[in-house]
Amino acid sequence: MASVSVASLRVRCFRNIATADVEFSPRLNILRGDNAQGKTSLLEAVYVLSTSRSFRTSRLADVISFASPAAHVHARIRERDLLREQTVGITRSSRVAQVDGKPVRRLAEYAVLSPTVVFDTASMNLVAGPGSDRRKLMDRLALYASPASYGHALAYGRAVRARRRLLETAGIGARDLDDWEELIVRHGRAWATARATAIECLAPRAQELFCTIARMSPALTLTFHSGSPADDDAFRKALATGRDHDRCHRSDGTGRHKDDVRVRLGSRDLRSSASQGERRATVLAIKLAEIDVLRQNRGLTPLLLLDDVSSELDATRMEAFLAAVRAADPQVLLTTTRPELIAHHGLWTASECCEYRVHAGAIHVV
């Protein structure tokens, strides 16, 4: 299977990285150094380059270095035997993405061009955090499997906001409420179907990989949980009967914002009953399964970004995880304060591995 990889990267005024020019191995790249030196910022720059979004903040302007007017990330991306240039420029009020020097019109199309999977500290929220993190996972997978889901999500959001405005300004008997609620049901159902399908594709592979990484037999199950009635008529009724509540509370009592994924290990809900090691192994299994789902839908092995993955994994589980990564064969950019935990496994040859030292925002080949 062909893969997507970053051949070279140029970063300017991105967090604590004033300037960096790096060439990467198409296989394993180890970014070593102490904490707060810029390792995670470099991974974030790659993620922004590939998706036009950050995995650390919802406010993209936060990535701009202090006192700088803008940040800039540019890369040469290898897909099969072809090279293309991708660029993302960020100001305090805007972002511009370009492919081969030409601005893109739809960021959703740009986001699937160079598929990327990331694991960082916040990824642990997939198990123990709020449902919003699991909804982001579903939507990311759905965007590849069903590109139309993004349009349904936008249309659903517009209808929800219009209904809310009508309730506030005209009350529960407003004439157009039925029409907006019909759009909520129609687009919400299509969006929910895409989310549910994404989890159905992810779950079996995540279960298999969890057993490999954790060396445990209890079954890991991921199940889509709908935030609204499954039947369209029941959904319409719930919206209609909930108008007074929604108007008074200025919120929606039912809908896609309550969709979630239930994560269980055997009979246990991992959100409330799991060790830190079990949760970490679960999230890593989900991330590796995400690679498979994106590969099936995009026809490419995605880039894998791993931030401090060695934390809280014992040597046995670390070896099993790295072996699973090697089998998936993506380009890997990995940060660590303990490079010896990665290197001694011998899963990558010396020619496949590049190591860099990151210090005070500067990146040097070791």
Image (spheres, rainbow, N blue to C red):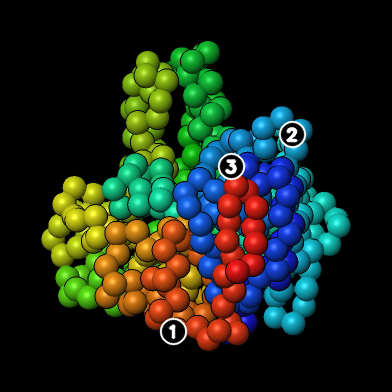
- Does any portion of residue 273 appear in the rendered image? yes
Q: In this picture, is 80 found above or below 150?
A: below
Dividing the picture into quarters, in which one does residue 366 lie? bottom right
Q: Is residue 363 left or right of residue 30?
A: right
Q: Position of residue 351 (x, y in %)?
A: 60, 85
**Mark 2 vs mark 3, CA separation in Å:** 36 Å
Earlier along the polypeptide chain: callout 2 or callout 3? Answer: 2
**Mark 1 vs mark 3, CA separation in Å:** 50 Å
Crowding near the residue tagged with mark 3, few <14, some 14–19, many ≥20 C-alpha atoms within 10 Å: some
Q: Residue at x 13, y 61 (%)?
A: 267
Dividing the picture into quarters, in which one does residue 22 lie? bottom right
Please tell me which residue lies in front, 120 or 17. 17
Element on which disc 3 rests: helix
Element on which disc 2 rests: loop
Q: Which mark is residue 346?
A: 1
Please tell me which residue lies in front, 339 or 182. 339
Q: Position of residue 292 (x, y in %)?
A: 47, 74
Q: On the image, numbered disc 2 is attached to which residue?
A: 68
Q: On the image, numbered disc 3 is attached to which residue?
A: 155
